[in-house]
Image (spheres, grey):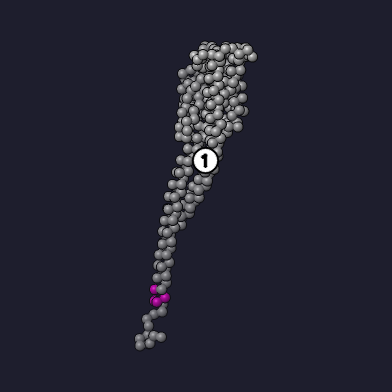
Amino acid sequence: MKRSRELAQRLHALSVLSEAFDAVRSVAASRFRGARAALEPYRLYRQALHEAVACAGVMLPGIDAEAPRVLVCLGSDHGLCGSFNARVAERAAEELAARPGPSIVVGRRLGRILARRGAPTDAVLEAPANEADVARVMLRLSDEVMRAQGPEGLGGVEVVCARFGGIGSLDVRAEALLPLHLDVTRPSYPPTPWASEAELTEVAVRELLFVELQSFLLESLASEHSARLLATQSASAWLDEHREQARRRLASAEREATTQETLELATVAGRSGAGIRRRAGPRAPGRAAR
């Protein structure tokens, strides 16, 4: 009976865990669909904007290579996403070791991993939970980047994040946000009479930075939710397997307990019958049985 109770409690605990993981998986699937749907238009717009700026012949301003580089690391606030944060932290630590400088982390869990590694962190921001939070986080991130620059300006901004390539793919890269690199080798259109070159450059840089940063955040968000979806699916499969094992063990234990009780009852009944016969004594000879 004790073993049956223990197995029943284990089965109940596994069932509760399975329900919790199913709920997390449903939320991750919903948010993953939203992030992936929002990412594709930004990729197309980013590509079209690069082509338009390159064709317009806009010469982007250079950046002082001697000034400090700001490293932006994009992770998550929550776990249950496999090695997502650990992989980003590993690449960020490599970049900081190769070229130290100010670092800004998006994602409290990623910030804790970097702190355990001894990597310097100047600011830790809350990560977006869904595509609707991306714009809010982007504004805070832009402010922190401006605060991180020294008196000599910026020597560049590099982003360490996971590029989304599908469920099960975790491609962590370090890519430059500043300086912006464009292919201006194609023929340029003649200057427009409606805007000066300085105005066109200002608008182009502002829009490019907005799109690039928004794309980085959406790439990271889609990668996070796809990693969480995969991790929760694996956890649910593991729990289902162990629940089935617990059910079989519980059924076996209950059969063993029932058999043992039956044997004990039969033994007790047999002993009771033998005692009654001994007390009744031998039957009188010659007496007819009715």
Residue 276 among magenta residues: yes
Residue 36 in sight: yes
Who's the residue at 44% across and 58% down the image?
Answer: 254
Disc 1, SS: helix
| Relative image position of residue 135 (x, y in whole percent) | 61, 28
The image quadrant of residue 27 is: top right
- State the quadrant of the C terminus: bottom left
As displayed, is residue 10 above or below residue 62?
A: below
Q: Nearer the viewer, residue 278 or 62?
A: 62
Who's the residue at 47% across and 21% down the image?
Answer: 95
| Relative image position of residue 225 (x, y in whole percent) | 52, 35
Who's the residue at 60% across and 31% down the image?
Answer: 133
**Residue kind at label 1, given as amino acid type:** Arg
With 40 as the anchor, is 269 left or right in this view?
Answer: left
With 254 as the anchor, is 150 left or right in this view?
Answer: right
Report the residue marked by disc 1.
25
As displayed, is residue 78 above or below residue 253?
A: above
Magenta range: 274-278
| Relative image position of residue 175 (x, y in whole percent) | 49, 22
Residue 24 in sight: no
Residue 268 among magenta residues: no
Identity of the residue furthest to the left in this view: 285
With 208 as the anchor, is 174 left or right in this view?
Answer: left
Q: Nearer the viewer, residue 65 or 254?
A: 65
As displayed, is residue 54 above or below residue 239?
A: above
Who's the residue at 51% across and 42% down the image?
Answer: 21
| Relative image position of residue 90 (x, y in whole percent) | 46, 26
